[in-house]
């Protein structure tokens, strides 16, 4: 079954499907009819994944060693 990490929309107060209060930091839940209905009504929102920050610069090195095509040796006809 599909799962989603959801949090309450601002100003909304919706319980989990089993009646417990929705956690302040969100919850990963199985997407059921109840969850789809709460999403459609705007009570719940999908949590976005935090962006990962790369410490390496976005540069591309032009190295022929990795990208150059090497000739393919074939055992073809030597009389060409």
Image (cartoon, rainbow, N blue to C red):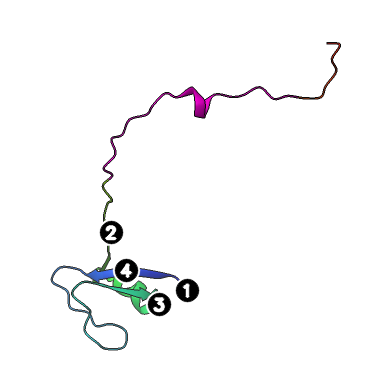
Residue 5: mark in rendering:
4
Residue corresponding to mark 3: 32
Left or right: 68 in relation to 17: right
The first of marks 2 and 3 along the sequence is 3
The image quadrant where one finds the C terminus is top right
Q: How far is mark 2 from mark 3, CA to CA?
A: 20 Å
The x, y position of residue 26, in whole percent, is 24, 72
Give the crowd class for mark 4: few <14, some 14-19, many >=20 residues within 10 Å.
some
The first of marks 4 and 2 along the sequence is 4
The x, y position of residue 12, in whole percent, is 17, 74
Q: Is residue 63 above or below residue 25?
A: above
Q: How far is mark 3 from mark 4, CA to CA?
A: 13 Å
Q: Which secondary structure lies at badge 3?
A: loop
Residue range corresponding to the magenta coloring: 54-73
Residue corresponding to mark 2: 48
Residue corresponding to mark 1: 1
Q: Which secondary structure lies at badge 2?
A: loop
Magenta stretch: includes residue 29: no
Q: Which secondary structure lies at badge 4?
A: strand
């Amino acid at each position: 079954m599909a799962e989603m990490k959801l949090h309450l929309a601002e100003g909304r107060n919706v319980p989990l499907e089993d009646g417990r209060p929705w956690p302040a930091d969100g919850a990963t839940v199985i997407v059921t009819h109840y969850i789809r209905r709460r999403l459609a009504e705007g009570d719940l929102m999908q949590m976005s994944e935090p962006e990962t920050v790369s410490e390496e610069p976005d540069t591309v090195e032009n190295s022929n060693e990795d990208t150059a095509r090497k000739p393919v040796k074939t055992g073809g006809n030597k009389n060409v």
